[in-house]
């Protein structure tokens, strides 16, 4: 599990900087259409400099298990983040059986609040997905609540857009049977308020700590990580 993840890292220099700032997870993006998507040679350079104790997480949406496992072996990934839709046939989907098919890796499932439901039911689709995954052989180890997107959203626009989550809505939706992280538009200025309002014990940022898509801003990263760690009650780095 992680407490502070910086996602969409695209260079070895940024990976070193993010780790030195105190993040305990780095996301490597393999989602088609994303401005942060990595080719394998580029991903190898990034993964090679991530120090021990910092999780290497591959981010995918609708990829086949064989592809994800091959990349995980190549890069010595610690985990896989499934960022596709929970169900349906309109856009990339990551079905519940993926957890069992990716056995041996930490599986992090991205989900979204269902704003059409009453507050306490807005994570019910995530609860059903987790239950189905467990019934299929294995469940995720962690869930990230990201900003809502319309049905049919292309894979490359499923995350890293800067859109925020209803933080209080996350708290009202109730817990899940696995640790919960918050993503969606987090930056150095709002991360403390987001942690306090949502009750989440982990955070994930991409666009909110960037100079341009895929290039991180060292000052923003340092302030984001320090602020998040303090709000989460973690020791300073």
Image: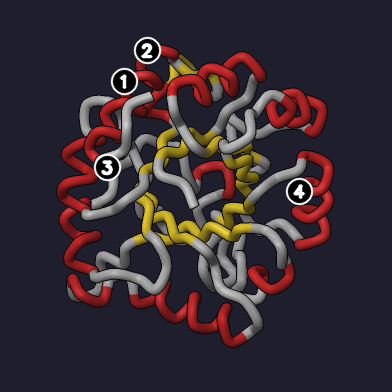
How packed mark 1 is, by other alpha carbons closer than 10 Å (few <14, some 14-19, many 20 or more), is some
- Which residue is drawn at the image coordinates 61% and 65% (left, top)? 94
Between discs 3 and 1, the one toward the N terminus: 1
Residue that label 3 marks: 232
- Name which of mark 4 and mark 3 comes first in the sequence: 4
Dot 2 alpha-carbon crowd within 10 angstroms: few under 14, some 14 to 19, many 20 or more? few
Other residues around mark 4 within 10 Å, as few (<14) / some (14–19) / many (≥20): some
- Pointer 2 with pointer 4, Cβ within 8 A: no
Name the mark on residue 100: none
Residue at position x 56%, y 81% in the image: 134
Q: CA distance from mark 4 to mark 3?
A: 29 Å
Tell me the distance, in whole angstroms, between the alpha carbons under discs 1 and 2: 6 Å
Check if mark 1's residue and mark 2's residue have beta carbons within 8 Å: yes
Q: Earlier in the sequence, mark 2 or mark 4?
A: 4
Q: Secondary structure at mark 3?
A: loop
Disc 3 versus disc 1: nearer the observer: 3
Q: Which residue is mark 4?
A: 72
Q: Secondary structure at mark 4?
A: helix
The mark lying in front, picked from 3 and 2, is: 3
In the rendered structure, the answer to whether residue 210 lies left or right of residue 220 reads right
The residue at which mark 2 appears reads as 219
Query: Quick check: 140 above or below 228?
Result: below
Seen at 53% across and 57% down, the residue is 108
The reply to whether the C-beta atoms of the residues labelled 3 and 1 are less than 8 Å apart is no
The quarter of the displayed image where residue 115 is located: bottom left
User: 12 left or right of 213?
Assistant: right
Residue 103 % position (x, y):
71, 67
Q: Which residue is mark 1?
A: 223
Residue furthest to the front: 235
Q: Position of residue 51 (x, y in %)?
A: 63, 29
* Secondary structure of residue under mark 2: helix
Say what secondary structure mark 1 lies in: helix
């Amino acid at each position: 599990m992680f407490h502070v993840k910086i996602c969409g890292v695209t260079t070895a220099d940024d990976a070193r900087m993010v780790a030195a700032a105190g993040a305990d997870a780095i996301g490597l993006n393999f989602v088609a259409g994303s401005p942060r998507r990595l080719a394998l040679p580029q991903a190898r350079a990034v993964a090679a400099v991530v120090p021990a104790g910092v999780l290497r997480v591959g981010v995918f949406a609708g990829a086949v298990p064989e592809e994800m496992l091959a990349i995980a072996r190549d890069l010595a990934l610690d985990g896989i983040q499934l960022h596709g839709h929970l169900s349906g046939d309109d856009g990339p989907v990551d079905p519940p059986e993926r957890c069992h098919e990716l056995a041996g890796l930490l599986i992090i499932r991205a989900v979204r609040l269902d704003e059409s439901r009453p507050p306490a039911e807005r994570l019910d689709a995530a609860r059903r997905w987790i239950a189905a995954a467990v019934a299929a052989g294995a469940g995720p180890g962690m869930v990230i609540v990201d900003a809502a997107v319309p049905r049919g959203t292309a894979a490359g626009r499923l995350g890293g857009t800067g859109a925020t989550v209803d933080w209080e809505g996350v708290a009202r939706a109730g817990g899940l049977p696995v640790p919960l992280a918050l993503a969606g538009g987090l930056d150095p200025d709002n991360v403390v308020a987001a942690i306090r309002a949502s009750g989440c014990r982990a955070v994930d940022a991409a666009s909110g700590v960037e100079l341009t898509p895929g290039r991180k801003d060292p000052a923003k990263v340092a302030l984001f990580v320090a602020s998040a760690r303090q709000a989460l009650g973690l020791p300073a780095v």
